[in-house]
Image: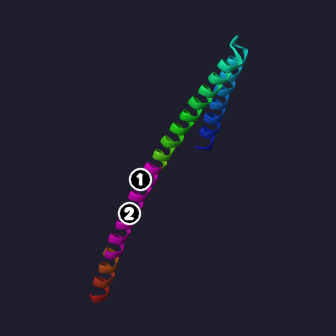
Amino acid sequence: MNNSKNIFGTLLLGVAVGVAIGILVAPDKGSETRKKLMSGAQDLADQLNDAVSESAGKINDLKEMAQDRMDSLKEQALAYSERTQKSMSNNINV
């Protein structure tokens, strides 16, 4: 998970640097260049926000799956414990 964060962060940084360099070397007026930079920054912020939202959703899904699995294991352990108690009780009463 940590490795994918590094890769994703590096990818976003590369895109941002590429866009900035492309805009800065383009033959536009300063005001147009600033508009393009702001637009590119806003697009990057939107992409980052989308990625964070998607990651949060995936984390929530994993949390729910883990909770469901824990509940299932808890039920299985309780059922096993009850069976063991009955078996021991039957053996003692014999």
Specify the color scheme.
rainbow
- The residue under label 2 is which amino acid type? Asp
Q: Residue at x 68, y 17 (%)?
A: 22
Residue lying at 68% horizontally and 13% vertically, measured from the top left = 28
**How far from the left and from the top, in percent, is residue 57?**
46, 46
- 68 vs 26, left or right, is left
Alpha-carbon span between mark 2 and mark 1: 10 Å
Disc 2 marks which residue? 71
Mark 2 and mark 1 lie on one chain; the one further toward the N terminus is 1
- At a point 59% along the width and 26% down the height, the residue shown is 39
Q: Residue furthest top?
A: 27
Q: Position of residue 71 (x, y in %)?
A: 38, 63
Relative to 81, 27 lies left or right:
right
Q: Is residue 90 rendered to the left or right of residue 68?
A: left
**Identity, as a three-letter code, of the amino acid under mark 1:** Met
Q: Which residues are magenta?
A: 60-82
Residue 43 placement (x, y as % from top left): 56, 29
Residue 76 coordinates in the image, percent (x, y): 35, 65
Quadrant housing residue 72: bottom left
Q: What residue is at 67 percent from the left and 20 percent from the top?
A: 31
Of 93 and 60, the residue lying toward us = 60
Observer-nearest residue: 10 or 29? 29
Instruction: State if disc 1 and disc 2 touch (CB < 8 Å).
Output: no
- Disc 1 element: helix
Front-most of 46 and 12? 46
Quadrant occupied by the C terminus? bottom left
Magenta segment includes 14: no
Q: Quadrant of residue 37?
A: top right
Q: Identify residue for label 1.
A: 65
Q: Is residue 75 magenta?
A: yes
